[in-house]
Image: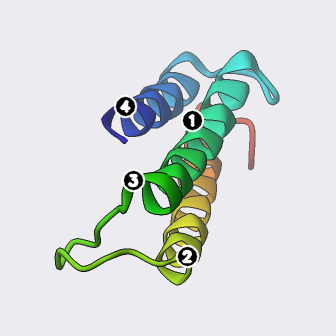
Amino acid sequence: MLVGNGLLYLSLVLIASRHAPLPSYLDVIAGAAVLAMIGARRVDIVRFGGRTVQDEPASLADWRRFSLLLVVVAAVSWLIAHFISGNLG
């Protein structure tokens, strides 16, 4: 999760600061980071008995909630990064 969040954050910062075109390789990195985090969380829950923040067993409902929140936050952040870079607007 740390690596995925770091890659997503770094790619969004680079999109905004380097005025990356739309689309660019940084968009692919951001998308791959989101997909990897969603997949890693599912594997954690299904194979390794993943836990919630409250230290309870995580369910696939928790995974769906996590996935939806991650996609929404990442998409809004991606739009903001491209807006800052001048690609949207």
Q: CA distance from mark 2 to mark 4?
A: 25 Å
Q: Residue at x 52, y 61 (%)?
A: 46
Q: Which is nearer the N-term, disc 1 or disc 4? A: 4
Instruction: Tell me if label 2 and label 4 are in contact, CB under 8 Å.
Output: no
Q: Which is nearer the N-term, disc 2 or disc 4? A: 4
Identify which amino acid the numbered label 1 is placed on. Answer: Ala
Across and down, in percent, residue 37 comes to 51, 45
Foreground disc of the pair 2, 4: 2
Does residue 29 lie above or below 73 as drawn?
A: above
Q: Which is nearer the N-term, disc 1 or disc 3? A: 1
The residue pinned by badge 1 equals 33
> Which residue is most to the left?
54
Q: Which mark is residue 6?
A: 4
Instruction: Tell me if label 1 and label 3 are in contact, CB under 8 Å.
Output: no
Across and down, in percent, residue 64 comes to 59, 74
Q: Which is nearer the N-term, disc 3 or disc 4? A: 4
Identify which amino acid the numbered label 4 is placed on. Answer: Gly
Identify which amino acid the numbered label 2 is placed on. Answer: Leu
Q: CA distance from mark 3 to mark 4?
A: 23 Å
Instruction: Tell me if label 2 and label 3 are in contact, CB under 8 Å.
Output: no
Q: Is residue 24 left or right of residue 30?
A: right
Q: CA distance from mark 2 to mark 3?
A: 13 Å
The residue pinned by badge 2 equals 60
